[in-house]
Image (cartoon, helix red, strand yellow):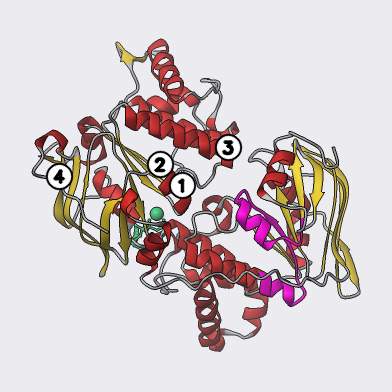
Amino acid sequence: MVTVTNAADPASAPVIRAVEVVKRFGGAIAVDRVSVDVQRGEIHAVVGENGAGKSTLMRMLAGVLTPDGGEVLVEGAPLSGGPRAALEAGVALVHQELSLVPEMTVAENIVLGTTPSNAGFIDRREMARIAGSALAEIGVEVDLDERVARLSVSLRQFVEIARAVARKPKVLILDEPTATLTPAETDYLLDMLQRLAAAGMAIIYISHRIPEVFRIGTNVTILRDGRLVTSGRLDQTTPGAVIDAMVGRELAKDLAIRREAHPGNVVLDARGIRAKKVHDVDLTVREGEIVGLGGLVGAGRTELVRAIVGADTRTGGTVTMTAGDRTRRIGSYRSAVNAGIGYVPEERRTDGAALTMTVIDNVALPNRWELSRWGVLQKKRIVEYVRQLAGDVGLRPPRITREVGEFSGGNQQKVVIAKWLGRNPKLIILDEPTRGVDVGAKAEIHRLVRALADDGAAVLVVSSDLPELLELSDLIHVIRDGRIVGTLSPEEATEKSVMSLASGERMVGA
Ligand SMILES: Nc1ncnc2c1ncn2[C@@H]1O[C@H](COP(=O)(O)OP(=O)(O)OP(=O)(O)O)[C@@H](O)[C@H]1O
Ligand SMILES: [Mg+2]
């Protein structure tokens, strides 16, 4: 790939530059002398494996972190004074993890930090005007007075973007904005970014989805282990070359030959399930079977699995779990865990991992009964056990004594997966298991899930990532408005057949 520098051309002076920036955490170096130039109207993709340093670099560009070396220049002027100064200089960051205040309204969140006031009182009309026009600019309709806690994850994401756009930034940075969106919402967002770029904004954009990067990106910067691998124009490279540069080796072509599924007895039997957003769903999963739940974000898939495991209240229906010759009713989350159900929730930051605890404690936690039997003297054995699992999911860096919150987003997800895989669950329920996980680790997690099923576990997967859903599932139920609207065998399942059911374009057989 050719590295393009436009320093000699004043008409295309970069609007933001990182010059040899360095960031260390403790002794470890997260970003090592990385330089990037971004110009007006450019959509600059930043890619790399989990832990490569992408978010850290973005936080430096947006003034959230101060570089330990090098500097960030916005329109030629050195950036200092934190995120507020960066915003004033025209740099807005949409964080990887949602950062809205759930108890506040949409409008309050959008103006947060720059709340208009009049003689000491919040100027509500001005607030509504600013928030309304930011939402209009991105073309999203949502009630300004609604509390953010009540919005779907994808709407929150759009509100977060509206908040950044409300600042009228020269540089808009988005850290994995599409991870929580459906394909249709993703399309919408990508078109919107192209529109903003065409109007002269510089966009910096992180994604693990290489096709997206090629669809809208003009330039790409590839990071690996905190270092810049290369930077250049996207029309001068190929997806294969970008991925190879990210992982630093040729990725073994995923020989995803379809697994021969041999489903056995019914393990999970859910009948007539009713709950908030779930209407009378029957669902079974058998030994050795991977059942996928497809549908649009907001269709009720998460609500359905939460009702099944007893994490949310059911208003109707029964769930039984059969392991060996024992059948138990699942009435509460505790009974689900006791019956051998593993559950990897969608929201890892709130219900998946204890961020201030170490990897060892997180992974050992759901297994504490078995492990405590080994006693204090068996500490070494626990460490071995966790180290093995961390290796299986490709934790990077593999430092299991470190707090989970210190890992990159994708690596936090790997911890949550490891926690359950080690328990050899009879049934494992995975809600968006590889969201934010890089291509290599994703393939590894898929391999582990298939291996679990091959060993006889029943698996239920919710995924908005269609290739993932198609690749893993032995059977796909498509959910719309809280109901199963169609069931597809591997032969019938294609991106098209799943999407048309999910969006209600047709019912099966119609
Ligand atoms: N607050 C922190 N304390 C300690 N280490 C950190 C902290 N934040 C990030 N790191 C480390 O810095 C490195 C880069 O992390 P970063 O979050 O920038 O990765 P990333 O490329 O954004 O990954 P992902 O794709 O998983 O989001 C990782 O090794 C990570 O563990
Ligand atoms: Mg990140």
The quarter of the rendered structure image containing the N terminus is: bottom left
| Amino acid beneath label 3 | Ala
Residue at left offset 39%, top offset 33%: 194
Mark 3, residues whose alpha carbon is within 10 Å: few (<14), some, or many (≥20)? few
In magenta stretch: residue 467: yes
Observer able to see residue 113: no
- Label 3 secondary element: helix
| Amino acid beneath label 1 | Glu
Provide the residue span drawn in magenta.
450-475
What is the count of numbered marks?
4
Residue at left offset 67%, top offset 57%: 470
| Amino acid beneath label 2 | Ile
Q: Which mark is residue 6?
A: 4
- Outermost bottom residue: 377
- Label 4 secondary element: loop
Mark 4, residues whose alpha carbon is within 10 Å: few (<14), some, or many (≥20)? some
Query: Looking at the image, is 488 positioned above or below residue 9?
Result: below
- Between marks 4 and 3, how big is the CA–CA gap? 36 Å
- Between marks 2 and 1, how big is the CA–CA gap? 6 Å
Q: Which residue is mark 2?
A: 216
Which numbered disc, 4 or 3, marks the residue that appears first in the sequence? 4
- Between marks 4 and 2, how big is the CA–CA gap? 21 Å
Query: Looking at the image, is 255 positioned above or below residue 504?
Result: below
